[in-house]
């Protein structure tokens, strides 16, 4: 399938599946798999069809450095276990938009650039809105229980390494430094996630994303129909 066909199929499925309550769509994948790009593309398509979309990033729910680097800045185990503030993500965003929530939400709890918690005012979601959130470890058990539709972006590690290190080279001190961080921290943590949480197993759709122009789409009809 070409990328446009994949985007159209996912968009149409979300619209057909969601009901009158807020519908929480989560996108996961290893670091630099292409999940943020996909989330942005789907957000745009849904908005073009008149759907109110709440766009959020798991990266806006980090723990401060004192917590996320407590096992060392280069620790893969620390990245996997300590990087994200699950409690804030659940209480401020995912649970309020669930079927028993009050629809009062915020999309950010922490600012990476300042390493400070932020006091973001709460908004009230429209009843028929769609939450679109992406994050590397988003399908951990406590989080996936608060998602209504899950998409896993599957990309080979070597391809994600090249994409990610090129993208992050300026922020991480050059290309070789970026590759080193991916090889020692980000991708070993991603392997822990794949082994422990088996995110593909819980996905309603899987996007095979090695070829950005011609991705493949696998649909888990049983999960969607259930």
Image (cartoon, rainbow, N blue to C red):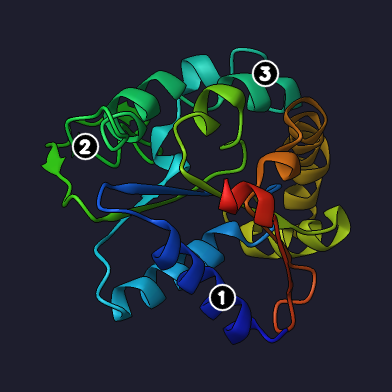
Q: Earlier in the sequence, mark 3 or mark 2?
A: 3
Circle 3: element type: loop
Front tag of 3 and 2: 2
Q: Which mark is residue 9?
A: 1
Callout count: 3
Q: Earlier in the sequence, mark 2 or mark 1?
A: 1
The answer to the question of whether label 2 and label 1 lie on touching residues, with beta carbons closer than 8 A, is no
Residue at (30, 38) in percent of width and height: 108
**Nearer-the-camera pick, 166 or 156:** 156
Front tag of 2 and 1: 1
Q: Which mark is residue 201?
A: none
**Nearer-the-camera pick, 59 or 140:** 140
Q: Which mark is residue 72?
A: 3
Picture quadrant where residue 45 is located: bottom left
Can residue 73 be seen in the rendering of this structure? no
Circle 1: element type: helix
Circle 2: element type: strand
The quarter in which the N terminus is drawn is bottom right
Can residue 55 be seen in the rendering of this structure? yes
The quarter in which the C terminus is drawn is top right
| Residue 135 image offset from top left, x and y in percent | 54, 44
| Residue 193 image offset from top left, x and y in percent | 74, 32
Residue labelled with disc 2: 105
Residue at (74, 82) in percent of width and height: 214
**Farthest residue toward the front?**
226
The vertical placement of 112 against 158, above or below, is: above
**Nearer-the-camera pick, 154 or 190:** 154
Q: Earlier in the sequence, mark 3 or mark 1?
A: 1
- Mark 2 and mark 1: span between their CA atoms? 28 Å
| Residue 111 image offset from top left, x and y in percent | 34, 37
Residue at (29, 42) in percent of width and height: 107
């Amino acid at each position: 399938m070409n990328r446009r066909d994949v985007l159209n199929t996912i968009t149409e499925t979300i619209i057909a599946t969601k009901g009158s309550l807020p519908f929480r769509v989560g996108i996961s994948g290893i670091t630099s798999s292409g999940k943020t790009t996909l989330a942005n593309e789907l957000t745009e398509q849904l908005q073009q069809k008149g759907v109110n979309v709440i766009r959020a990033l798991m990266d806006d729910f980090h723990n401060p450095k004192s917590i996320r680097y407590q096992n060392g800045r280069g620790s893969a185990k620390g990245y996997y276990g300590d990087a994200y503030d699950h409690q804030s993500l659940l209480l401020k965003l995912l649970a309020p938009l669930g079927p028993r929530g009050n629809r009062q939400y915020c999309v950010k709890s922490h600012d990476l650039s300042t390493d400070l918690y932020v006091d973001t005012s709460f908004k009230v979601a429209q009843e028929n809105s769609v939450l679109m959130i992406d994050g590397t470890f988003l399908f951990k058990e406590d989080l996936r229980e608060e998602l209504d539709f899950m998409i896993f972006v599957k990309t080979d590690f070597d391809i994600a390494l090249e994409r990610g290190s090129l993208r992050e080279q300026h922020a991480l001190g050059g290309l070789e430094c970026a590759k080193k961080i991916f090889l020692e921290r980000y991708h070993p943590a991603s392997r822990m996630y794949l082994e422990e949480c088996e995110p593909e197993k819980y996905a309603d759709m899987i996007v095979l994303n090695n070829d950005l122009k011609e991705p493949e789409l696998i649909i888990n009809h049983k999960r969607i129909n259930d």
